[in-house]
Image (cartoon, rainbow, N blue to C red):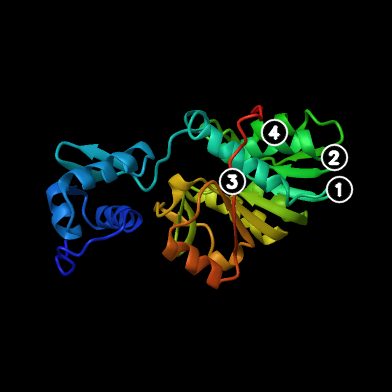
Amino acid sequence: MSTASLKRRTSKDERRRRIVAELQANPTVRISELARLFGVTTETVRRDVDSLSEEGLVSRTYGGAAATSLSREPSLDERHGLLVAERQRIARAAVDFVEDGQVLMIDSGATTAHFVRRLAVERRRLTVITNGTGLAAALAANDSFRVLLCPGDYNASESGTYGPEVGAFLERYRADLAFIGAGGVTLEGPNDVSAELCWVKRAMIERASETTLLVDQGKFGRFGLLRICAPEALQRVVSDAPLPAELAQAFRHQGVELVIAPAVQETEIAL
């Protein structure tokens, strides 16, 4: 661990990013070492680590932290119960970019599940191509939609179809818009934990005129095994909170629109 910036105070966002970065280079780190590196108290670092642990970015250990696996993410069923209010806000904001009658591609995911439920309520006459079996069922609730489910190998953990058949199927179509999720977002772009997830997202990006990334703040600075695409392949990112300053600057530099979902008014009733 470098000590070049010993005693230099850092912001909360910078500390969190650097904690994750340190764990990419070292399997485990001690809280006392991080406190010396950042020039803050051990209690401050402990709160940072606790927050990162709650978001699934690191694993809490006695006296320190350990990196979570770059190649494993909780199942879709497990993720459905996390950050529900935040994902509902993202879904509401993202629907505003969809017009009746368009063709959409949407990949299977926890955030996209909220998005399709909102679509089914607010939009008409859409054609939606998806690899998500649960997403297809939710979309079919709107009888004005045409829903095309990608064929392929079924992955129960992700509630979706994957493999070469999905790519071949997507090659037959063009879409106005693609909406994808990600396991993490760094300066290099969005990422995810496995090749099969990334292949589907890339295929949708290639076949759509515009791509919108739907991502909650827990994914900021999070590293996955594989990069999905470069930032410039995206047209916009819709999130529940502002991206960290360095990340936001990098994405804006590539012409990516950053959309922060507004807070839901207390009088609103969530679906």
In front: 218, or 25? 218
> Disc 1 and disc 2: Cα gap in Å?
7 Å
Point out residue 142 in the picture as x, y percentages from the top left corner.
81, 31
Q: In the rendered structure, which amino acid carries the disc numbered 1?
A: Gly
Q: Earlier in the sequence, mark 1 or mark 3?
A: 1
Q: Secondary structure at mark 3?
A: loop
Q: Counting residues from the N terminus, which is met first, the one under dot 3 or under dot 4?
A: 4
Tell me the number on the disc at residue 101.
Answer: 1
Q: Position of residue 34 (x, y in %)?
A: 18, 53
Q: Is residue 153 visible?
A: no
Name the secondary structure under disc 1. Answer: loop
Going by the image, does 268 lie left or right of 74? right
Q: Work out how far the residue at label 1 is from the one at label 3, CA to CA, in angstroms.
A: 29 Å
In primary-sequence order, the first of circles 4 and 2 is: 4
Q: Are marks 1 and 2 in contact (CB under 8 Å)?
A: yes
Q: Which residue is mark 4?
A: 117
Question: Which residue lies under the disc numbered 3?
Answer: 163
- Residue at 60% of width from left, 43% of height from top? 90
Q: Residues within 10 Å of mark 4 (few under 14, many from 20)?
A: many
